[in-house]
Image: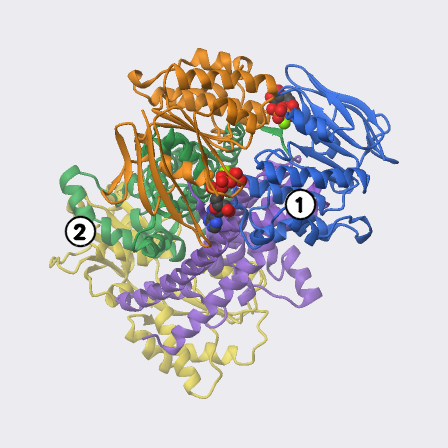
Chain colours: A green, B purple, C yellow, D blue, E orange
Amino acid sequence: MLSGDEWQIVRLSLWVSGIAVLAALPLSVALAWLLARVRFPGKAIVDGVIHLPLVLPPVVIGWLLLIAFGLNGPIGSRLHDWFGVGFVFHWTGAALAAAIMALPLMVRAIRLSIEAVDPRLEGAARTLGAGRWRTFRTVTLPLSVPGIVAALVLGFARSLGEFGATITFAGNIPGETRTLPLAIYAQLQVPGMDAAVMRLAAMSVALSLAALVASEVLTRRGAFGAGAHVL
Amino acid sequence: MLSGDEWQIVRLSLWVSGIAVLAALPLSVALAWLLARVRFPGKAIVDGVIHLPLVLPPVVIGWLLLIAFGLNGPIGSRLHDWFGVGFVFHWTGAALAAAIMALPLMVRAIRLSIEAVDPRLEGAARTLGAGRWRTFRTVTLPLSVPGIVAALVLGFARSLGEFGATITFAGNIPGETRTLPLAIYAQLQVPGMDAAVMRLAAMSVALSLAALVASEVLTRRGAFGAGAHVL
Amino acid sequence: SLQESLTEAAGAWAKAGHAMPVLSFGASSALARQIRAGAPADLFFSADEDWMDAVEQSGELRPGTRADLLGNRLALIVPAGDRRRFTLDRRLPLARLLGNGRLAMADPDAVPAGKYGKAALAALGLWPDVANRIARGESVRTALAFVERGEAPFGIVYETDAMASSSVRVAAIFPAGSHKPIRYPVALLKRSASPDAAGFRRFLASPAASAIFRRHGFGPL
Amino acid sequence: MSFDIDVRLRRRDRDIGARFRSDGGLTVVTGPSGAGKTSVLMMIAGLIHPDAGHVRIGEATLFDKAARVDVPPERRRLGYVFQDARLFPHRRVLANLLYGYRLAAPGHRWMEPDQAIDFLGLGNLLDRWPRSLSGGEAQRVAIGRALLSGPRALLMDEPLGGLDPTRRDEVMRAIERIRDELRVPILYVTHDRAEATRLATHTLTLG
Amino acid sequence: MSFDIDVRLRRRDRDIGARFRSDGGLTVVTGPSGAGKTSVLMMIAGLIHPDAGHVRIGEATLFDKAARVDVPPERRRLGYVFQDARLFPHRRVLANLLYGYRLAAPGHRWMEPDQAIDFLGLGNLLDRWPRSLSGGEAQRVAIGRALLSGPRALLMDEPLGGLDPTRRDEVMRAIERIRDELRVPILYVTHDRAEATRLATHTLTLG
Ligand SMILES: Nc1ncnc2c1ncn2[C@@H]1O[C@H](COP(=O)(O)OP(=O)(O)OP(=O)(O)O)[C@@H](O)[C@H]1O
Ligand SMILES: Nc1ncnc2c1ncn2[C@@H]1O[C@H](COP(=O)(O)OP(=O)(O)OP(=O)(O)O)[C@@H](O)[C@H]1O
Ligand SMILES: [Mg+2]
Ligand SMILES: [Mg+2]
């Protein structure tokens, strides 16, 4: 079916997308909560910045990442000096690009769910002795599970499909940053490689289908005995 | 500030994204409802197909669109013969590509909101004489407004940023399919055009910020007197 | 890339009293696929001979109208601050010069600039040493950006691209014999209905157009 | 008009249901918490599917497991006052009141909005959002909404819960009129003995 | 332990609030629907901010506009039984009951889970999801949850609404014990005269 190289690509894609989504999750939750429940000056700006990866072509995002997180960039140079972390030409760069591209989708999904949580339940938790933070952890967050699951699915799918920012920022290096979309793109450039393209594309689709099915199972688990008194 | 050409690009981007989102909205609502409230065999497949534009690199989606909707494609040829509609090298193609790429985000946002609608309210509407369809229109849909607004914002932003599928499917034709991302990409190909890139990117960002602010106003309008008895 | 010079050439053609041609720029692969899918195009100007061959094989070209219009050269580039010059031959210790860095170039298996680069390095016997030190870009432009930003100490791009960027410097030109000649073929498409198409194609081969291309660094054939 | 009800439902731990006939009037349904009062009303309304039995009201068969009759809730024409008010949060009070009224065939309506607004004391709440109503205010709107939908029978689940004695008395008087003058059959869940004694023409005890 | 309350709130159309002192015991709060009973309880609990006034319970000043004291709800230690049950839908009944119990300092607790489960008859509901409870069952869980949080005072908003007479009597007996033996001050909203007469040591009428 797939060649050894192709398996390596699939494994790398899974790894990069998995790390990207897990890394983006806490930030997404924090931003979603901020946007859903807090009024502060400059909120529109924060919201706008989060949406940038959607609005700008991915190549531009990759280019901005290169400027900021490259070895000579203001953030990248410090990260490199202090922690020895590099992004360009490294799988961490692919994961960073994927996380950034997935972020707006994840924030929005979680935000929708947080906004749908009945604030009266949060009030009840407060009277029972839970502070703001505990109320968030024990009431708001668990009731936002549908949004979190949706965020994981959307984010994972988006990461799996991420191409433009990754190749511009992290380059296309076999075994390091060559994820499925990069491999597919390379094959697309060669006349007559349609079969290889289709095989890799099918692999992407299979991975995301698995994630979808897993998410449906998760949501059904989290339905809190729904189905009773349904109408 | 912007040159005449650049204004034309902005206008075209707005037009293409606007049409794309409006065209995708009814389909998104229908699919979201189906996925949220109906159990049917093959649901996972429908869900999977909807996610394809996220999972596959945009260029592949553009290529698949080309195969299906090109003049020699099974759908494209018929649409051309019957209605005289062409997509390749035509703004309709850019809009179609943008709509397809926005669809998964829109469906998911609306689905999240529909799932959060209390089914007991739908039950109340039924006892008051509203059939399924009227209940959907008068109860479920208005209560899903947060998701619909989120879908419009996400979809519009995604459409504004759409590049890979568009250039592969509809080409890069000034005044016809050269939207902001394509123009930005073209400038990026030319070394030393960073200022032009920045100007166009700023335009994209401004458009999406405007959409964001409009959406916040919309949602606040639709808050049904929230704020009372808040906790 | 062809984009700027072709835009300029089209402008000159229009100034001479003709209708402005509609130009669509994209990767050769995308354009070729659009043509095969029945896109209403008149002329195909490709940076990739393989794709021109593919379109020809699928019978989309008007016989006898294919011609190689432009040539280009392959350059080894370094960041603008780097003052070194090199001679590209078998003795160049490219791998050692790279150190931990990478050699940025377009995908050597897929994109024409990368394919030429790989062939040239192989002919010079340098390829085996650097094969696993390559940073592949999606296009020449991406490779250029890596060198511009100082992420990669060396890159291989077309001379035309190197000339257009002030952040990189040409450290060496690949010897002409180290790779197949870089050619940009053009051809009329069978489907073309425009009466102007053939004229514009002739114009592109004319001295007036050649001057434009030459100014951007192309070598008209 | 009469009830002829026989509904049963298998729950995880035990069976729930009721079987009774009554020739119109107001049937008070009582029984301890969890006896199945709400479940029976929901089955009659068509919001839960009984595992067996039938629901006949007057001439109309609304459900019959054996005969495979199952009229959907919107065509049963039963005015349901839920235990919780269940107002539509996206419609103001007036729009909530008129929701069923507008859907009802004019010939089926037997109360006008003005009347309902008047005896339920909703006059100064009409342009309020449900979320801003007090418990008793919401409950009164819910009663009005059900009455205005022109139902052939009423299902009322503790409709006076949360009402103060004065309102309670007014609403009870209205219910008596609906029972006696309009002869709308009523199924009425309550735990209050005084209410039961005053309103009941029949009593059904569950559990 | 005593209440010393003075809270007021400007609403669009009129002012709402209450001002009273009582030296412990159970204060019944009555008044017509919409009088502001729930609003007063919410202000005391810290869930709505009064525009002016103060809230003192025993020695503790929980709110004082003038002195800029505003203790957050979670540190007021007030057990609130809401007019609607407000159970956490994502926790089973037992987890709902224990939510406040676990957060309370052991020294503040004055009732054990077993006791509450016993006199509220919740034994066979412990592993159920709130969504599957009947109205009365949910209400009983809500009462238990508030009692178990070890509060210094209770705010009860029609706590017996939806309970059948037998349960009602049992819960009332428990409330009497809490009032008399544990001497927890209670603010108790009800429309029921019998309930008021039986439980009240003071009465506050709003509206
Ligand atoms: N999904 C479910 N799974 C198990 N038991 C359920 C479910 N839904 C409801 N029940 C139980 O069915 C019984 C009947 O519930 P119902 O709401 O009809 O009671 P009720 O007589 O209206 O009580 P109340 O007076 O408290 O409102 C209750 O014990 C309830 O807990
Ligand atoms: N956001 C709001 N805007 C305007 N009025 C409001 C708002 N929220 C509450 N009210 C009004 O404040 C008044 C007091 O409400 P509250 O819930 O305190 O009444 P209550 O005495 O508890 O009544 P009930 O016995 O019906 O529960 C009511 O008339 C209510 O409609
Ligand atoms: Mg009930
Ligand atoms: Mg109240």
Q: CA distance from mark 1 to mark 2?
A: 71 Å
Identity of the amino acid at label 2? Asn
The answer to whether the residues at label 1 and label 2 have Cβ atoms under 8 Å apart is no
Host chain of mark 2: A
Q: For the residue carrying disc 2, how many other residues have a C-alpha within 10 Å: few (<14), some (14-19), or many (20+)?
A: some
Identity of the amino acid at label 1? Gly
Q: For the residue carrying disc 1, how many other residues have a C-alpha within 10 Å: few (<14), some (14-19), or many (20+)?
A: many
Secondary structure under tag 1 reads helix
Q: Nearer the viewer, residue C39 or D102?
A: D102
User: In this image, A87 relative to B180: left or right?
Assistant: left
Residue plotted at (37% across, 69% down): C3
Residue at the far bottom: name it: C17
Discs 1 and 2 carry the same chain letter: no
Secondary structure under tag 2 reads loop
Residue plotted at (45% across, 71% down): B11
Residue at the far left: name it: C83
For residue E111, say whether it is visible: yes
Q: Position of residue B99 (x, y in %)?
A: 53, 56
Disc 1: which residue: D144
Residue plotted at (41% across, 39% down): E40
Q: Which mark is residue A72?
A: 2
User: In this image, C35 relative to C183: left or right?
Assistant: right
